Image (cartoon, helix red, strand yellow):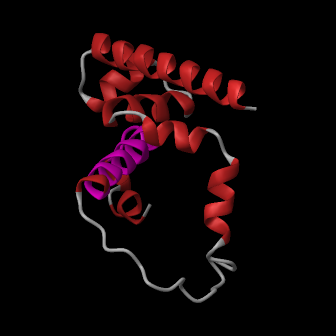
Amino acid sequence: MTDAYRNWENIAHPKAWVHKAASRTLARKVASVEEPVDDIPEPSALVPRPDAIAEWEARHDALPLLRSLPMKQRQVMAWTLASFTPTDIADHLGLPAENVRANLKKARRTAAAYLKAREEEQ
């Protein structure tokens, strides 16, 4: 968001710009190697209970599902969940619309299989 503030006068489509910037940041983070943290950080105003983050994520079905997808499918699905159309996604990411639609189709199939398997487990 600070990058958006710094570049505000050059941004034509703020919502798309922020999603694109976040997607790129996620891709860099996934590609980098992280070192595990030994101790849970001290509580702060931003994170009153640091251990509660994992509990919150576990309650949400979309997060494990999105994590299981390949990067392009994850990216396209995240943009779709943010109410972007395949054409919008293709324009903003500089991809062919056919590729976006194909990745979205594969992601939806994976999501359906994931939800069916979860349903059978319960």
* For residue 64, above or below residue 101: below
Residues in magenta? 11-29
| Quadrant position of residue 56 | bottom right
Q: Residue at x 56, y 31 (%)?
A: 81
Q: Residue at x 43, y 13 (%)?
A: 105
Q: Is residue 50 left or right of residue 122?
A: left
Query: Relative to the observer, which residue lies in front, 99 or 58?
Result: 58
In the image, residue 30 lies at what x, y percent?
A: 30, 53
Count of numbered marks: 0
Q: Is residue 75 left or right of residue 117?
A: left
* For residue 62, above or below residue 112: below
Q: Residue at x 50, y 27 (%)?
A: 80
| Quadrant position of residue 54 | bottom right
Q: Residue at x 62, y 65 (%)?
A: 53
Query: Is residue 63 part of the magenta span, yes or no?
Result: no
Quadrant holding the C terminus? top right
Query: Is residue 20 part of the magenta span, yes or no?
Result: yes
Residue at the outermost top position: 98
Q: Is residue 22 left or right of residue 60?
A: left
Q: Main secondary structure of the magenta part?
A: helix
In the image, residue 36 lies at what x, y percent?
A: 37, 74
Residue at the outermost front position: 121
* For residue 106, above or below residue 114: above
Query: Relative to the observer, which residue lies in front, 7 or 98?
Result: 98
In the image, residue 94 lies at what x, y percent?
A: 24, 27
Residue at the outermost right position: 122
Quadrant holding the N terminus? bottom left
In the image, residue 51 lies at what x, y percent?
A: 63, 74
| Quadrant position of residue 42 | bottom right
Query: Relative to the observer, which residue lies in front, 45 or 84?
Result: 45
